[in-house]
Amino acid sequence: MSKVTLIWFSETNQPFKVLSIRKSLIYFLVGAGALATVLAALFIWLTHVLHQDLQAYQSKTTRLQQQIAEKQESLEGKLHDRKERIEKLEQAVAAKKSSIEELKTRLSQSQKELETIRDMELKVRRYLGLESDESLTMGNQTHQGGFTSMGTRLGDMSSAANATAEGNVVSYSLSLKESLSEVLSSLKQREKTMRQRPSILPVQGEDIWLSCSYGWRRNPFTSRKEFHAAIDVAGAWRTPIIAPADGKVIKKGRTKIWGRYLRIQHGSELVTAYGHLHSFEVEEGDWVKRRQVIGYMGNTGHSTGTHLHYKVVKDGKHVNPMQYILDRNPQTLALR
């Protein structure tokens, strides 16, 4: 077997050493060294590659974390903006609800006011003797004027139909405007006649009340049921009594029942009478103007207290005086 002999000289005066090594061992050692070198180089390369991959992974992770942070910040900003928008929308909805409630209230008030105007319009029409069309209701406006009855009352409309109600109110207002224009035109044409037509409460002042209305009642002296063909308006002693229209004093006197009384002729159809007066301010035959003081409230005749007995006669027949009182709401003269 081939060997390799190595001679080792340590010092000059010392014998040398001989070392024999087999070639196969040398080949093995060389191969092992080469293999170790290759493995070491491969390890170093792998370590370098892994280090680069790790750096790339760390860089990518950092970028992803930054992107996640940016996305999270963006989402938080969007959520904040959306929350603000929702809050603003909620505030807007609340404001709209408040506005709707306010509009409902105003609509209800408008309905009541229109009803009051409508009642006054009917009263004026009756007062003027104008014809009335009974066909018009809140749901059937023709815009042709000439209507008489509320038919469907404004206040009876369902709150679930506010839009329809609003349309009806507008339509009804236009119709009412046309009808009132007709009334105004009639008033202008009849101005002279109107001055002689009773239209106001013949009692001056506000501290007054209706003590007895027109119709059946118990007589306070006999307790018998009788028809009271007048109205009694109570107030303070010597409250001024005024003429409800232009006219002529056709009677001035005193009776056991009426006490001091007056009668005034208004045109050819109407006569007004005033009883239980304290005193007079006019004489028989005098011409008087509307709102002129004609006497003072008293307690003369058969009377249970200071008041005015007011009667209206049309063509010889008694009529309800309230039809000829346009300046007062009947509710303000309620029985006490």
Image (cartoon, helix red, strand yellow):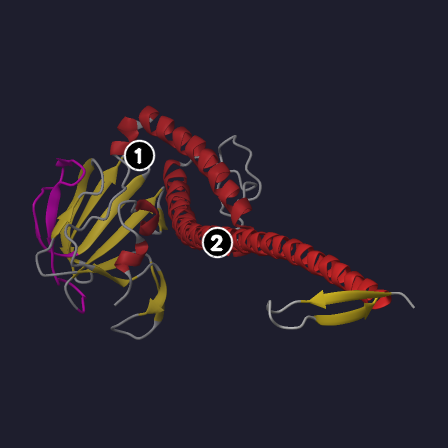
Q: Who is closer to the viewer here, 53 or 275?
A: 53
Residue drawn at 54 percent across, 41 percent down: 136
Residue 147 location, x and y as percent?
A: 49, 38
Left or right: residue 307 versus residue 269 is left
Residue drawn at 13 percent across, 40 percent down: 292
Residue 260 location, x and y as percent?
A: 13, 55
Residue 85 location, x and y as percent?
A: 46, 50
The residue identified by callout 2 is 73
Left or right: residue 242 versus residue 73 is left
Q: Who is closer to the viewer here, 17 or 183?
A: 17
Quadrant (top left, top right, bottom left, bottom right) of the C terminus: bottom left
Which amino acid lies under the numbered mark 2 shown in the image of this protein? Glu
Q: Is residue 291 magenta?
A: yes
Residue drawn at 27 percent across, 27 percent down: 192
Left or right: residue 200 versus residue 20 is left
Q: Is residue 264 visible?
A: yes
Q: For the residue carrying disc 2, how many other residues have a C-alpha within 10 Å: few (<14), some (14-19), or many (20+)?
A: few
**Circle 1 sits in a helix, a strand or a loop, which is it?**
loop
Q: Is residue 158 visible?
A: no
Mark before the other along the chain sequence, 1 or 2? 2
Disc number placed over residue 268 in the picture, else none:
1
Q: Residue furthest top?
A: 189
Q: Is residue 41 magenta?
A: no
Measured Cα–Cα span from mark 1 to mark 2: 93 Å
Q: Who is closer to the viewer here, 236 or 159?
A: 159
Residue 55, placed above or below residue 256: above
Q: Which contiguous range is marked in magenta?
A: 276-304
